[in-house]
Image (spheres, rainbow, N blue to C red):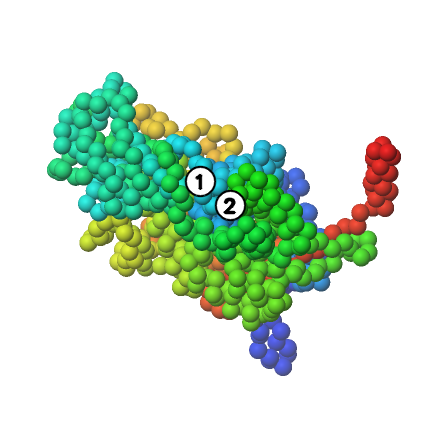
Amino acid sequence: MNTWMAIVLGGAVTAITASAMGQAAVPQSHMSVHDQAALVDEYCSDCHSSDEKKGNLSLDDLNLEHPDKTVDVAEKVIRKLGVAMMPPPGKARPAPDVMKLFVNSLASDVDTAAALHPAVINPALHRLNRTEYANSVRDVLGVEINADKLLPSDAFSHGFDNMSDVLTTSPALMDAYITAAGEISREAVGDRHAVALTTTYDVQRVVSQDHHIEGTPMGTRGGISVVHDFPADGKYTFKVSFFFSLDGPIFGGLQAKSEQLEISVNGVRAALIPLNPKITKFDDIHTPPIDIKAGPQRISAAFLPIADGPVEDSVQPTGMSLIDLNQATLAGLTKFPHLHELSIVGPMQVSGISETPSRKKIFSCYPATKAEESPCAQKIVSRLAVEAYRRPVSAQEVTGLMKLYSVGYADGGFEGGVTVAIQAILASPSFIYRFERARVQVAEHASTPYNISDLELASRLSYFLWSAPPDQTLLMLAEQNRLHLPTVMQAQVKRMLADQRSMSLSTNFAEEWLHLQNLKGVLPDAYLFPSYDKILGNSMRKETELFFNSVVQGNQSVLTLLDANYTYVNEPLARLYGIPNVLGNRFRRVQLTDENRFGLLGQASILTLTSASNRTSPVIRGKYVMEVFLGTPPPPPPAAQQLPEHGSNGSVQTVRQRLEEHRQNPTCAGCHKFMDPIGFALENYDPIGGWRTLDAGTPIDSSGQLYDGTKLNSPVSLRKALLAHSDAFVGTFTENLFAYGVGRVIHPTDMPAIRAIEREAAAHGNTFSAIVLGIVNSDSFRMRSAEPQVPKSLLAQIDLVKASKTTATH
């Protein structure tokens, strides 16, 4: 072996630059291409040659002299080796410092080449997703809507639902937008000619009704609380139904002789319904007509707790109220009645329209005479169009909207005309899409980046940080052409992150990055985990959202997500975690003394969504950590048998024992040796995140070895191992936030810009705002590339088509 190979492969990281004069050695900061090739040949080529091509990767395709020509392969190598995932366990590997030098050198070579030929990838035409649509309606009209009920679901790409490449439009979707625009405009203005309609809200049987429900008056039990938008002042009736067993009797009928259900409006009792224990599912139970004002009102239906006592049942403790619906006449869980549906019917009689938040937002003027109607309408329409379109509007656009105002005026007068104009604004592509001007390339093959306008930059920034349109401050700075200035941008990012609207980063970005939306479909086995119900499941989700928001608004290091010694809990969560002295539904920040609960890995939301319904899943948990925290998901599994519920001889075995039998299959072992040790380190958490020491009556063995050789034996050791790869965690986080911020799928050519953001953020303590500033100051966020010229031959064809159509019309 020659001298240079001995230096590289033997683990030395210093270049011997000392001369015969005895100069001191200096650290080697960059590995030469020659040495990089030697390392790849020694440690990688046996598995990743054109013949073997394990993991569907051949390093024969990697051009180390010009890595920009094979950037997709180079980035795969950087990603895997950056977390020491390769060479795999059991294979020879270079010393860690040599590995790091190789990765840094290859990344540096890619970044240097990228700097010579910067590329800006344009997002596709960006349609508002459902969240952005609802928030835009709220900011423009002052109306809170449930977009999930008005519009079909959005597709996901790169883990997020705001990716422009999948936010496409179909005829069915456009029809939904038009229908939604009509409903929203009438709701915002109010409807003096409203007819009686029925809106029904249901309570899932997996929601416990044994305790107080958030939003209902204090001192009540169970039920439901909703904010309902009433179209007009008038009389409304409230209908209720309860859970019945399959053969007829009401649940709780044995004890329901004195039960009463209270209907309240904004916390004030409006009706009290006595409960007859002999009612059937076909009985019509409703209140007398009740006068309700127009606009959003909080309506609650909850039981008055006449009697209370310990619940005795075969399953203890009881969290899920109705494990099944077969029997309603057994003592225990069935001692309480359970509300099933609350229906709001009306208005029976319309008495007018009160001043609602949306009407205050819309009617900046109101005509006193007929002559004032059109000028006032034009003022309203022009202002709303500017806010909705997020840019100045032309006189031609206002004229078109006023024509539609005239159509509505003919049937509904001034307010009817405004309603139709608002419907047109909400259905306009200028509201539904985030348009950005395009420039054509000045020369063939010349993809010249250019700065987007400040108005376009304002929309990109606000939909990134707020999932909402820009406010007046951003629009004013954009119109003054000052928003792009570094000091102004920095001040605005700081202001926007401190604003409560930045909570959208928790409820949208963090929820999708951490896959929290999957909690909606999680339902642990009720007999094995009876303390779980949807209230606890929703509390898990909210804990993580509040925790993430504390990092955002506190401008903490994103590594706090891994090692924070605090969290947010309410009573159900505190009971699960064994935290004392926490009562009620209100969330509060608590200091943690148990290191196993530090950071995201100790939170029940993640532990629950990475489990099966009746057991833990070290495989799913290990895969989750690799994919979400380190950005290195394992390859898709081959067709294999499911994990058996028992040992090979029918014996009761722990999950670990069953997995060890499963991974004896060589086809399965290749990936399991990466995932399983991570999952085993979390085995002390049960399927809903509670702490345990036994599995199937056997003490839990949480020991293992990470792919880089690190010993694991607990959640604490796993957290420390992840912190040892903190650069990978920060890099993965930055990559995901970058994708979310620019609203498109990440390409390998984006990685140099992302690494530049990481380096700058590291110099500022990896704070959340430092990463955000790096993203919004990047070329990808501030610029577009010129569009290719349309071929002259195509233009000639278009002209021929136009000419033929013109001839045909004459």
Q: Which mark is residue 415?
A: 2
Q: Quadrant of the C terminus?
A: top right
Provide the residue designation for mark 1.
192
Q: As rendered, which of 443 and 228 lies closer to the eye?
A: 228
Q: Residue at x 40, y 57 (%)?
A: 549
Q: Residue at x 40, y 32 (%)?
A: 196
Q: As rendered, which of 733 and 810 lies closer to the eye?
A: 810
Q: As rendered, which of 796 and 10 lies closer to the eye?
A: 796
Q: Secondary structure at mark 1?
A: loop
Placement of 327 over or under 85, stated as above or below: above
- Residue found farthest to the top: 247
Q: Quadrant of residue 351?
A: top left
For the residue carrying disc 1, how many other residues have a C-alpha within 10 Å: few (<14), some (14-19), or many (20+)? some
Q: Quadrant of the N terminus?
A: bottom right
Instruction: Tell me residue 578's x, y (percent).
Output: 23, 49
Q: Are marks 2 and 1 in contact (CB under 8 Å)?
A: yes
Instruction: Tell me residue 267's x, y (percent).
Output: 26, 46
Q: Residue at x 22, y 47 (%)?
A: 218
Label 1 is placed on what type of residue? Arg
Instruction: Tell me residue 727's x, y (percent).
Output: 49, 59
For residue 123, say whether it is visible. no
Placement of 325 over or under 770, stated as above or below: above
For residue 221, say whether it is visible. yes
Q: Residue at x 45, y 53 (%)?
A: 360
Question: CA gap, disc 2 to disc 1?
Answer: 9 Å
Q: Does label 2 or label 1 sit earlier along the sequence? A: 1
Q: Secondary structure at mark 2?
A: helix
